[in-house]
């Protein structure tokens, strides 16, 4: 049970929650994801599209992986063709394309978990909640989920996660909280743990930055973006693949 | 909501858990309706059968998804809609069964010799009674399954008992609808069970709303 929790989750933020087993992390995540309602207090400003990945996804559902993901895509508000496309895309990214037509009930634990991760990423959720979502994934899929999380934040989505591995997304998380007793307390990152990269970019006149990115004006007309090193690749990808692509003038590591 | 309903319907169909309640309904009709039986009386019987069948279908639909999958859907659209979609899917399935049962009774029942009523009026009364019974059954099912009753044993017992009460206690819309038809058959006059239908609708909406709101509070 938790009391007096006050947590702000800005767009583009990657937030880690930790705490002992049975301490209420999962409850907190379920409330953040909108699955449960708090008995007191409220949640405001939750993005329209939220998605949740549970720790275990023993989906005894009478569907194939593709059929389930297509249904979930449509539940998330995608059209039929787009839902099927995104299902194929995410199964491919998690290395589960071979299981696309396998009934969910026949999937191994790891493959089920890939389907669980895929359903959450289908519709580019504005809020992604991961409750030890990496558990059971193979190394490649874990790395892919890390990449997907960083991409999501670079695109302006908020990601909240719990993972037993302290190295998970280390240095990338913007905020870090620990459940202690019935309270949620902020955890300060050790100084110097996170390196930053400065990106100087120039866009067409009036071009807007992708959502979730902030920048300062650079001398000479461009923009300067300071981002955690671990996130720089995703930010660069976001800038280069924007509908009006940005020109990257320089990328430098900050001391 | 359309995507969610489509998902719930596919889940119900592919899970094959609809077969048992529908077999119960078919057996109920086979046991109680014979070709040439008085039409209104048979329509009342066919409607009454929908109470436990709908309650059972509701239980099937709200327990069809593993908790983890339900959580994923709840994060996407909210737990209230997830539960509402399950309830509506069950009601839809029961109404399809009720439509088939009512149509079968209309084909084989006899309105002329025994009852001297207009078959059109009798059909309308039968449809209203079927709707009233399905809605009452849906209310029983919604109140007697997850999230209000979690244990399987308690939920099944409560659902069975609830259906019996819906048949038996005064004031139950299902009972008044069926009574209207059976008494109409004896009196050789059709009474449309409009009030029973309205009462059942209100009851089902109330019970459904309670179940949906509780599902948001505790999965």
Image (spheres, coloured by chain):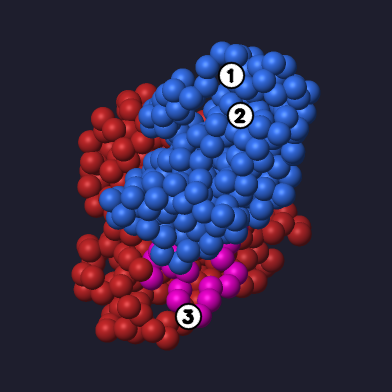
In space, the residues marked 2 and 3 are separated at their CA atoms by: 53 Å
Q: Are marks 1 and 3 in contact (CB under 8 Å)?
A: no
Query: Image quadrant of residue B148?
Result: bottom left
SS under mark 3: loop
Q: Nearer the viewer, mark 2 or mark 3?
A: 2
Q: Position of residue A252 (x, y in %)?
A: 45, 64
Magenta-drawn stretch contains A38:
yes
| Circle 3 residues within 10 Å: few <14, some 14–19, many ≥20 | few
Q: Check disc 3 and report the residue beneath it.
A: A40
Q: Check disc 2 and report the residue beneath it.
A: B41
Q: Position of residue A52 (x, y in %)?
A: 42, 55
Q: Report the residue at 23% width, 63% height from top.
A: A164
Q: Report the residue at 46% width, 67% height from top.
A: B217
Q: Is residue A3 left or right of residue A214?
A: left
Span highlighted in magenta in the image:
A28-52
In space, the residues marked 1 and 2 are separated at their CA atoms by: 8 Å
- The colour applied to the residues of chain B in this rendering is blue
**Magenta-drawn stretch, dominant element (helix, strand or loop):** loop
Q: Is B206 drawn above or below residue B68 in the view shown? A: below
Q: Position of residue B209 (x, y in %)?
A: 57, 59
Quarter containing the C terminus of chain A: bottom left
For the colour red, the matching chain is A
Q: Check disc 1 and report the residue beneath it.
A: B37
Q: Are marks 1 and 2 in contact (CB under 8 Å)?
A: yes
- Check the residue under mark 2 and report the chain it is in: B
Q: Report the residue at 39% width, 46% height from top.
A: B160
């Amino acid at each position: 049970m938790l009391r007096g929790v006050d947590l702000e989750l800005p767009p583009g933020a990657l937030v880690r929650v930790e705490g002992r087993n049975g301490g209420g992390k999962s409850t907190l995540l379920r409330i953040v994801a909108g699955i449960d309602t708090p008995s007191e207090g409220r949640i405001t400003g939750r993005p329209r599209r939220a998605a949740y990945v549970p720790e275990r996804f023993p989906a005894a559902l009478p569907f194939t992986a593709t059929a389930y993901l297509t249904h979930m895509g449509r539940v998330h508000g995608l059209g039929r063709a787009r839902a099927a496309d995104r299902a194929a895309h995410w199964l491919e990214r998690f290395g589960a394309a071979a299981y696309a037509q396998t009934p969910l009930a026949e999937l191994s634990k790891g493959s089920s978990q890939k389907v669980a991760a895929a359903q959450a990423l289908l519709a580019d959720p504005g809020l992604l909640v991961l409750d030890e979502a990496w558990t059971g994934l193979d190394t490649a899929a874990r790395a892919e989920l890390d990449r997907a999380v960083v991409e999501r934040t670079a695109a302006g989505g908020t990601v909240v996660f719990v993972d037993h591995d302290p190295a998970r997304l280390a240095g990338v998380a913007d905020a870090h909280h620990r459940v202690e007793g019935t309270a949620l307390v902020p955890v300060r990152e050790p100084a110097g743990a996170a390196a930053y990269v400065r990106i100087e970019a120039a866009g067409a006149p009036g071009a807007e930055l992708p959502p979730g990115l902030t920048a300062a004006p650079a001398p000479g007309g461009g923009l300067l973006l300071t981002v955690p090193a671990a996130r720089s690749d995703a930010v660069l990808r976001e800038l280069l693949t924007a509908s009006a692509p940005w020109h990257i003038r320089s990328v430098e590591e900050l001391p | 909501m359309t995507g969610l309903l489509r998902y719930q319907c596919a889940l119900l169909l592919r899970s094959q858990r609809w077969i048992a309640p529908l077999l119960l309904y078919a057996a109920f009709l086979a046991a109680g309706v014979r070709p040439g039986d008085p039409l209104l009386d048979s329509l009342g019987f066919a409607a009454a059968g929908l109470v436990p069948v709908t309650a059972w279908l509701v239980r099937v639909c709200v327990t069809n998804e593993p908790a983890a999958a339900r959580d994923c859907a709840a994060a996407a659209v909210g737990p209230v809609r997830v539960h509402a979609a399950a309830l509506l899917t069950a009601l839809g399935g029961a109404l399809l069964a009720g439509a088939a049962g009512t149509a079968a009774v209309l084909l084989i029942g006899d309105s002329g010799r025994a009852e001297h009523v207009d078959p059109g009026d009798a059909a309308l009364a039968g449809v209203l009674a079927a709707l009233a019974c399905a809605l009452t059954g849906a209310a029983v099912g919604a109140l007697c399954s997850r999230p209000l009753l979690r244990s399987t044993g308690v939920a099944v017992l409560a659902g069975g008992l609830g259906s019996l009460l819906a048949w038996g206690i005064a004031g139950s819309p299902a009972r008044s609808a069926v009574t209207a038809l059976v008494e109409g058959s004896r009196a050789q006059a059709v009474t449309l069970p409009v009030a029973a239908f309205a009462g059942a609708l209100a009851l089902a909406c109330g019970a459904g709303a309670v179940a949906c709101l509780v599902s948001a509070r505790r999965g």
